[in-house]
Amino acid sequence: MTRYMNQCTCFILPKDVLERLAGDKKLDAALRKAARDSALISDAIRGLRLKNAELTGIAQSVGAHLVELAASPDVAVYNSKNTQNLPGSLVAKPNTSKDNTAKRCFTETTSVAKFYKSVFGRNSIDNAGMTLLSSIHYGSRYNNAMWNGSQMIYGDGDGQLFTDFTGGNDVIGHELTHGVTQHTLQLGYSGDAGGLNESMSDCFGSMFRQWEAGQDVTKADWLIGANIIGPAAAARGYKCLRNMANPADKSALAAQPVLYSQITPGMDPHYSSGPPNLAFATASLTLGGKSWERVGQIWYAALTTSGANPNMTIPQFAARTRQIAAQMYAQQADVGAAVDAGWKKIGL
Ligand SMILES: [Zn+2]
């Protein structure tokens, strides 16, 4: 059963950031409480994820995924109404809702589905039209967003450290990509595989953000979570959660290691994702153009064409992308060279 023991917590924010903020005496008591409560709830949700991933693995092994549910996914938005109730109550017409969070969640989730379909030919998370279910207004002042193994969950944030988590299109792309990973490589959530799991979500979340803006790699900000940083965090000099092109950036709330050799045993996947994030950003910037057109295609093929590989290491993933680049772009030597430059940047 070990191949299904995928303990992905799959939050956008690592736990230690919430714990650090909860213990920061310079912040007012209400903000510290919101951070502490968010860390506790995030812990409790972790258990749900394990069982959902196990079910996905078993369903795939019996071929249940071969049946398509719909030609394109339904997008359903539920409202938890600031409780921990899941999924909450269905929002009847989210696309015309007066609640901006509902409207944005529907619009951006639909857009992620379109991104996966038009850029990669993928029909929803499972490539079989799976309904994309989201719950908004989860908890009270809840500082996180997550994929729990079967649906997306978004908190409103406390309004000071973090704002509404649906406000980041990269956050929405990140969470949905955890679902894609669950249905493809089925990466675990510790060691190298955990870092790769988080990195896949950042790479596709960032690509989605760039695709929506029609941006060239040089125009992209390569930041994760820039739109959910609240005024109190901004006042302290923070501008994002992570910076893919500069993982050690001090203005990132969760600055990361840069080199593969700096990853240590037991490191939270939100930190070990730094080096593979930098490899992707470097390969994309070296090649130029639109990230999703060539480098993104290689990363997608590496994610989706190897079958399940829950314990995949970062060097194995690097080797796979080099191999795919050579096959897919045999006539374009600059593509392989760019991918190579990406991995060399982190020491691989
Ligand atoms: Zn994540």
Image (spheres, helix red, strand yellow):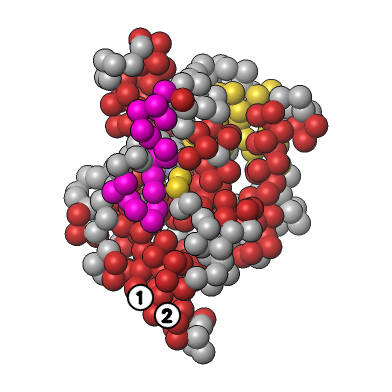
Judging from the image, what secondary structure is the residue with disc 1 in?
helix
Judging from the image, what secondary structure is the residue with disc 2 in?
helix
Q: Tell whether label 1 touches label 2 (CB within 8 Å).
A: yes
As rendered, which of 55 and 70 lies closer to the eye?
Answer: 70
The quadrant in which residue 81 appears is top right
Q: Position of residue 316 (x, y in %)?
A: 32, 68
Horizontally, residue 233 falls left or right of residue 216, namely left
Question: In the image, which residues are magenta?
Answer: 232-249
As rendered, which of 237 and 308 lies closer to the eye?
Answer: 237
As rendered, which of 317 and 308 lies closer to the eye?
Answer: 317
- The residue pinned by badge 2 equals 336
**Residue 90 among magenta residues:** no
Q: Residue at x 50, y 86 (%)?
A: 332
The circle drawn on residue 102 is none
- The residue pinned by badge 1 equals 340
Count how many numbered circles sit on residues in the image: 2
Q: Quadrant of the C terminus?
A: bottom left
Residue 168 appears anywhere in the view: yes
